[in-house]
Image: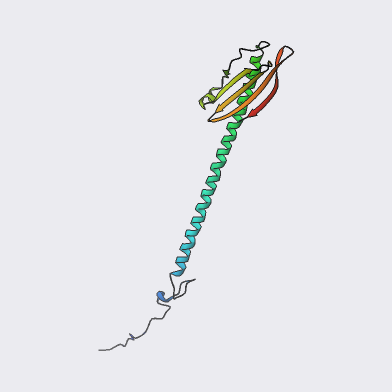
Amino acid sequence: MSWSVRSSCAKPSRVENPRHIPRSGASAASPGRANGFASIMAVVLLGIVTIAAFSIFAMLTADARRTRGAEIDAQLRQMLIAGAADLTEKAKSWDEKPTAAKSWNVELPPVLKQEGGVLKVVPVTQADGSVVTVIEADLQKRQAFQTIVMTRNDNRWEVHSSRWGK
């Protein structure tokens, strides 16, 4: 019988045991500290990105509202111009003193009617013989007004003054 001697007392070196290898950026005393810091930074960055995204969304929404408001205002101005043109056309048939000038609605295109558009012309004869006309334009819960003063000159009605308003 032969006996072989094996050394069972030999300790494994530190290199062979991966538990003893320190992680990069961490000390052997606090192995989980770096992971906690990275997690906190990730949450902070996520919060900053979220706030930035909401800010951009709010600005885009406000800009879209302003743009839509500008479109409606431009359309209201166009409607007032159409009302003034209709007024001057109807004024050609007025007598020297239009005592029976009545209000009327100007016919609008179907697209404006679908959006709730109304264009009304309201003439009022004054004591001096002039006619003060208020043109009212309504579109999508917004309004614009124009006041036109017409006087008789050389057997025809002319615009004496005009004023826009909202």
Q: Nearer the viewer, residue 89 or 159?
A: 159
Estimate the x, y position of residue 1 in percent, counting from the top left. 25, 89
Q: Nearer the viewer, residue 6 or 164?
A: 164
Image point 45% across, 69% down: which residue? 33
Q: Residue furthest right?
A: 154
Q: Quadrant of the C terminus?
A: top right
Image point 68% across, 19% down: which residue? 150
Q: Is residue 154 above or below residue 116?
A: above
Q: Is residue 35 above or below residue 145?
A: below
Estimate the x, y position of residue 59 in percent, counting from the top left. 56, 45
Image point 47% across, 62% down: which residue? 40
Q: Nearer the viewer, residue 112 or 3?
A: 112
Q: Nearer the viewer, residue 101 or 89?
A: 101
Estimate the x, y position of residue 99 in percent, counting from the top left. 63, 12
Task: Name the quadrant containing residue 31.
Answer: bottom left
Q: Is residue 73 above or below residue 21?
A: above
Q: Residue furthest front?
A: 127
